[in-house]
Image: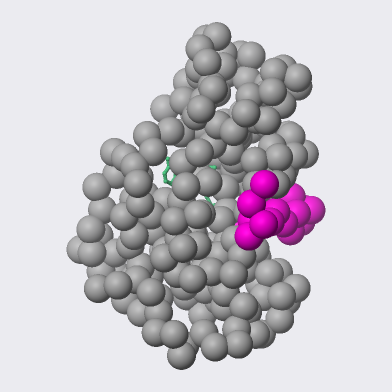
Amino acid sequence: MSPRLAAGEHQGRWRLGVMGGTFDPIHHGHLVAASEVGARFDLDEVVFVPTGRPWQKADKQVSEAEDRYLMTVIATASNPRFSVSRVDIDRPGDTYTVDTLRDLRRLRGPETSLFFITGADALSQILTWRGSEELFDLAHFVGVSRPGVDLDQRDISHLPADKVTLLEIPAMAISSTACRERQASGLPLWYLVPDGIVQYITKRGLYRDAVSHP
Ligand SMILES: Nc1ncnc2c1ncn2[C@@H]1O[C@H](COP(=O)(O)OP(=O)(O)OP(=O)(O)O)[C@@H](O)[C@H]1O
Ligand SMILES: O=C(O)c1ccc[n+]([C@@H]2O[C@H](COP(=O)([O-])O)[C@@H](O)[C@H]2O)c1
């Protein structure tokens, strides 16, 4: 089944993709996912939303929000359909997607349809997210394939079928964890992340002592 919604369903409505992530650092896997969902869902814009305090990574060392925000701005600057929002990093406390979507709905108005883009791994866990019963009223969820994560329709059969789509995208075997570890070991990051991100990481001395987390 084509993931595209019928044309009549979005006449006059702004179709906004929402790509939430810790982006520590942002890499080409994130950018390809956003671009691919943008094309396949006819999105007018994709807004990248760096997390403030990702509660599921509370036991891990996460770079300062301003560094992650700036890297996201640098990585998306050249694409006129990409933008970045500060809603999560400016909201105090732990970051929950239900708050992200409520804020974007308030800021963008009722004429905007929201499409939350997430890795398929995260999608299968979505019922453990805070306020999960409200999430599907706020947005359509698009779970993109990720190398190493084998997900099919059966794994999301517990989610409302009309609110969730699985999408196969060109495989990019890149993770932020691998980027941090490569930087710490002196291996190149070129072509895994945009050039400006390689330079920003060096300039700010990020990930010099990144350790592997299980
Ligand atoms: N290579 C990739 N292909 C497709 N989706 C990805 C890829 N990397 C990350 N994602 C998705 O992008 C979103 C934001 O990811 P996040 O910022 O946590 O990056 P990450 O690479 O998973 O980071 P980490 O390795 O630190 O956990 C998540 O929904 C994640 O599943
Ligand atoms: O709302 C939640 O409870 C929740 C739990 C886990 C992840 N998320 C969101 O999923 C997105 C990807 O998260 P992460 O930690 O994999 O970068 C990001 O926008 C998070 O805020 C949200």
Q: Is residue 65 visible?
A: no
Q: Position of residue 161 (x, y in %)?
A: 32, 76
Q: Quadrant of the N terminus?
A: bottom left
Q: Which residues are magenta?
A: 78-97
Is 53 left or right of 185, judged from the image as shown? Answer: right
Answer above or below: position of 98 versus 200: below
- Residue at the outermost top position: 186
Is 29 left or right of 95, judged from the image as shown? Answer: left
In reply to whether residue 33 is colored magenta, the answer given is: no
Residue at screen point 29% across, 44% down = 149
Residue at screen point 63% across, 60% down = 81
Is 182 left or right of 169, judged from the image as shown? Answer: right
Look at the magenta stretch and give its main secondary structure. Answer: loop
Residue at screen point 61% across, 65% down = 45
Q: Position of residue 57 (x, y in %)?
A: 55, 39
Is 208 left or right of 191, judged from the image as shown? Answer: right
- Residue at the outermost left position: 154
Q: Position of residue 34 (x, y in %)?
A: 51, 54
